[in-house]
Amino acid sequence: MSSIFTSKHILLGITGSIAAYKAAELASRLTQEGAQVDVILTPAAERFVAPLTFQSVTGRKAFTEAELWGGEAHVLHVGLGHSADLLVIAPCTANTIARLAHGIADDLLTITALAARCPIIIAPAMDVGMYTHPATQENIRLLNERGLHFAGPGEGRMASGLTGKGRMLEPAELLGHMRLILGKNGKLAGRKVVVTAGGTQEPIDPVRVITNRSSGKQGYALAQAALDAGAQVTLITAPTALSAPVGARLIEVRTAAEMLEAVLAESAGVDALLMAAAVADFRPKKAAENKLKKQDGILQIELEAAPDILETVAGQKSRKNRPCLVVGFAAESRDLVKNASAKLSSKKLDMIVANDITAPDSGFAVNTNRVTLLFKDAKVESLPLMSKAEVAEVILERVAGMLPKA
Ligand code: CTP
């Protein structure tokens, strides 16, 4: 299985900032994702980190100023820029931003950037005063206008001890920004996809809830896969411990009722709704206003049915409101295909993703999943054990295949 980075040629430029150490993790993660990573260090970057650090994690030569004056120099700076799918400069100092803005090409990195015809992402890293200085802001404006992409900076504590805007984004977040650019023209470009994720929480009192063991991992992976394919993604999520994929519009909810309201508002007329959330089937009839006390004795909680979101959304008569494709999930502990197929037809779905929650390597909380896809036309496709990211990729591929031509 491939990831969006597989076989991509990524150029990683590193400039002279203390955040340069974080670039080693970025280079490592890109390499693990299957990218071919070529690193260019400016002379100032070399004072913070060594080329060997990057050679060790990428398995490829890291380029430095020395190469600019070597025998291959005449092809190197143009060649690197021309063969790359993406140039990322992380960390990028105020000085390099200024040089890029004004077309100054006085080291291997800025020469390569000038020659490059691929998208460029800049991850600024500098002191807050330098970042907010009108000169830097004007340079950023110029580069933005020219189509370069800025990722960050974030806010937080800086090396100077001050707190403010200027921190380089963390590698995980930078990867998210890179995915967005690489996936822009994917199979789902121009499509709108709504994904739900996580287990809803139904209050018993102000501190207690009824919930389930859903981690949200499969839903978040679906949102990421849809973004990788170029879709515009809204992620409606119950509480999880996960960070939202970069680029998704996040709507946070708690209860089944809140999720229903959000799904109805967000999914009208979209291309696909992927209902991966584990929604409560039952909820306390009435949540206590104050914390229930032990001395009041053992509780009897009266439950009532929670709304069935899928049934409500997929069953809508108006073509304007119903998402073009509605995909459900079925968590089953027995008679997988039979039960899932009954849900497919009773909830009027286009596709259902069934998983056996009793298998230790599948279902709740783990990173892998073994699912069977059932389609409206009675086709059944059993997938082998895969990571949740891979499962998500296959689901989105099937969704893209089923959508009518735009
Ligand atoms: N679902 C929903 N609203 C609910 C319960 C479930 O929209 N109140 C959705 C889930 O998001 C999932 C699908 O319905 O996509 C099937 O969920 P599942 O829990 O497997 O099935 P249920 O319909 O709840 O049936 P049962 O619990 O009896 O198996």
Image: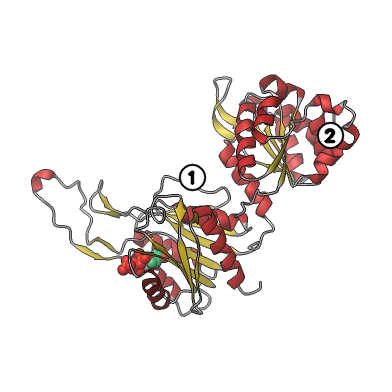
Q: From the viewer's perspective, tell me whether residue 389 is left or right of residue 90.
A: left
Q: Report the disc number at residue 265.
A: none
Q: Quadrant of residue 155?
A: top right
Q: Is residue 307 visible?
A: no
Please name the residue that numbered disc 2 is placed on. Answer: 111
Give the residue at x 61% y 59%: 231
Q: Amino acid at mark 2?
A: Ile
Name the residue tied to disc 1.
243
Give the structural element (helix, strand or loop) at label 1: loop
Ligand 1 image position (quadrant) = bottom left
Above or below 116: residue 229: below
| Residue at figure coordinates x 82%, y 44% from the top left | 82
> Looking at this view, is 136 or 208 the one in front?
208
In which quadrant will I find the C terminus?
bottom right
- Amino acid beneath label 1: Ser
Q: Is mark 2 within 8 Å of ligand 1?
A: no
The location of residue 204, given as percent across then percent down, is 23, 53
Q: Is residue 282 visible?
A: yes
Question: Which residue is at a point 37% across and 55% down the rendered structure image?
Answer: 199
Say what secondary structure mark 2 lies in: helix
Q: Is residue 384 left or right of residue 45?
A: left
| Nearest to N terminus: mark 1 or mark 2 | 2
Q: Note whether 232 is above or below 128 in the view shown.
A: below
State the quadrant of the N terminus.
bottom right
Q: Observer-nearest residue: 87 or 367?
A: 367
Q: CA distance from mark 1 to mark 2?
A: 36 Å
Front residue of 327/366: it is 366
Residue 253: percent from the left, percent from the top? 40, 54
Callout 2: 10 Å neighbours few (<14), some, many (20+)?
some
